[in-house]
């Protein structure tokens, strides 16, 4: 395989509802779409990167820089048959995982289309449907939060994730649990606590939570291990795990009992699969996290979540949870809390050129 041209597009999408976490507030997103061309074939990928460096250090601007100056030029030089060979073309680039993930995803799509296979088959997926959950931002008004949850439960979603922060935690979770005694609930702190707030977090043990996601610092696995010893609720790591090596070390240290696999945070589907395989061998449950992906990145999440080790419902909701109109056909929908894994070649959902052009705010083709 030889890629002869790469298009980059920044595509701006408004969110149907403002999304607040312990570190940021989002009304719209500027993800980068990556299109790799090889002869008549094209593959699509998405850098689902936040506009500001509050989840991780990358932003839309840093991804644009790293893609256009380093990753794309390296890939344009490369002859490859397997994704491992492609990835080795840019192995010198440290981190910048969101940028890598968008380009690598496009190459997986290209490879799958060149073999007329659905992406989930290339990855080793087995599930025909995936269980879908929703991630809910911090809401100032708890009645509004309860109404939102009711709406998603009525739509059939099987698991909810609540964003928490100091001051918006124990009491909110208490009210949600009282109103929804049976629904599986997880909470996500996005690193808002420190170890000396362990007593606050211990109170969450009373609510039969599936897990607490990333309570402590974004780059920590040591304090998480100390905290896990004091908590009954399993800790799940998100921000702290940016490679399969990190996953191995965190499991070795008992820093948590569950891992959130996010394609973009891990720098691509290959590394995501490595984390999955390692966790499977160690009986560590994993689930698929998200970054509000548009349809392209969402399709890749569906494909990876079809692997057998994804035993917990993930953050892959229907696109309508975030977007009035998504960029792909057919629309990605959850019915009765399940999303079908598509069987058409590549990502399995087709990008719609006019919708992308309408929302595109910046484009570049390489080589120039
Ligand atoms: O920590 O999982 C997170 C969104 C932005 C930044 C961080 C996170 C999230 C989500 C969104 O929880 C999950 C989704 O894509 O539905
Ligand atoms: Mg998280």
Image: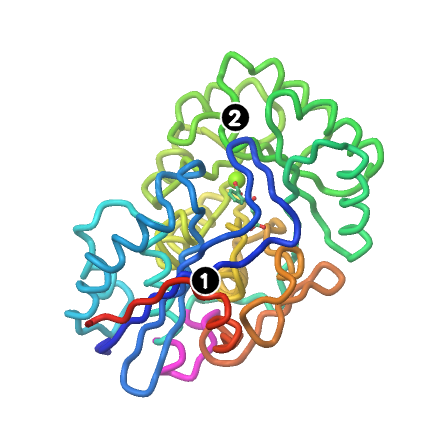
Residue that mark 2 sits on? 192
**Residue closest to the eye, 104 or 145:** 145
Task: Specify the quadrant of the image occupied by residue 55.
Answer: top left
Task: Specify the quadrant of the image occupied by residue 197.
Answer: top right
**Residue closest to the eye, 83 or 141:** 141
Task: Give left or right: position of 252 versus 326.
Answer: left
Question: Which residue: 38% across, 51% down?
Answer: 60
SS label for mark 1: strand
Q: Check mark 1 vs ligand 1: CB closer than 8 Å? yes or no.
A: no
Q: Distance between the residues labelled 1 and 2?
A: 30 Å
Task: Give left or right: position of 228 versus 1.
Answer: right
In magenta stretch: residue 121? yes
Asked if the residue at tag 2 contacts the one at tag 1, i.e. Cβ–Cβ closer than 8 Å, the answer is no
Task: Specify the quadrant of the image occupied by residue 360.
Answer: bottom left
Question: Which residue: 32% across, 87% down?
Answer: 40
Q: What stretch is highlighted in magenta?
A: 111-122
Mark earlier in primary sequence (1, 2) = 1
SS label for mark 2: loop
Look at the magenta stretch and give its main secondary structure. helix
Q: Where is residue 129 in the image (x, y as percent from the top left)?
A: 63, 66
Neighbor class of circle 1 (other Cα within 10 Å; few <14, some 14-19, many 20+) is many
Task: Give left or right: position of 187 versus 52.
Answer: right
Residue that mark 1 sits on? 11
Tell me if residue 79 comes above or below residue 115 in the rendering: above
Question: Which residue: 57% across, 47% down?
Answer: 27
Tell me if residue 230 comes above or below residue 132 in the rendering: above
């Amino acid at each position: 395989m030889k890629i002869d041209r790469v298009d980059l597009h920044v595509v701006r999408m408004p969110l149907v509802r403002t999304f607040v976490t312990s570190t940021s507030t989002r009304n719209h997103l500027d993800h980068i779409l990556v299109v790799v061309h090889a002869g008549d074939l094209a593959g699509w990928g998405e850098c689902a990167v936040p506009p500001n460096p509050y989840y991780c250090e990358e932003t839309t601007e840093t991804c644009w820089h790293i893609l256009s100056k380093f990753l794309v030029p390296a890939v344009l030089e490369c002859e490859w048959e397997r994704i491992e060979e492609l990835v080795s073309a840019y192995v010198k680039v440290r981190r910048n995982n969101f940028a890598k993930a968008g380009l690598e995803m496009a190459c997986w799509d290209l490879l799958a289309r060149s073999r007329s296979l659905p992406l989930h088959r290339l990855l080793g997926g087995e599930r025909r449907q995936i269980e879908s959950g929703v991630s809910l931002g911090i809401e100032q008004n708890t009645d509004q939060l309860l109404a939102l949850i009711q709406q998603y439960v009525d739509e059939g979603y099987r698991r909810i994730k609540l964003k928490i922060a100091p001051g918006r935690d124990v009491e909110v979770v208490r009210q949600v649990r009282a109103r929804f005694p049976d629904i599986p609930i997880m909470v996500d702190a996005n690193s808002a606590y420190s170890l000396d707030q362990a007593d606050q977090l211990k109170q969450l043990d009373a609510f039969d939570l599936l897990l607490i996601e990333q309570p402590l610092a974004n780059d920590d696995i040591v304090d998480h291990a100390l905290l896990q010893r004091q908590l009954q609720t399993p800790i799940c790591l998100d921000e702290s795990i940016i490679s399969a090596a990190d996953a191995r070390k965190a499991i070795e240290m008992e820093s948590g009992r569950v891992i959130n696999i996010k394609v973009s945070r891990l720098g691509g589907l290959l590394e995501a699969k490595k984390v999955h395989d390692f966790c499977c061998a160690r009986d560590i449950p994993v689930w698929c996290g998200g970054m509000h992906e548009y349809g392209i990145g969402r399709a890749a999440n569906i494909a990876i979540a079809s692997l057998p080790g994804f035993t917990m419902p993930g953050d892959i909701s229907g696109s309508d949870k975030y977007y009035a109109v998504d960029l792909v056909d057919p629309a990605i929908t959850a019915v009765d809390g399940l999303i079908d894994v598509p069987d058409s070649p590549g990502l399995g959902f087709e990008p719609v050129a006019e919708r992308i052009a309408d929302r595109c705010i910046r484009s570049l083709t390489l080589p120039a």
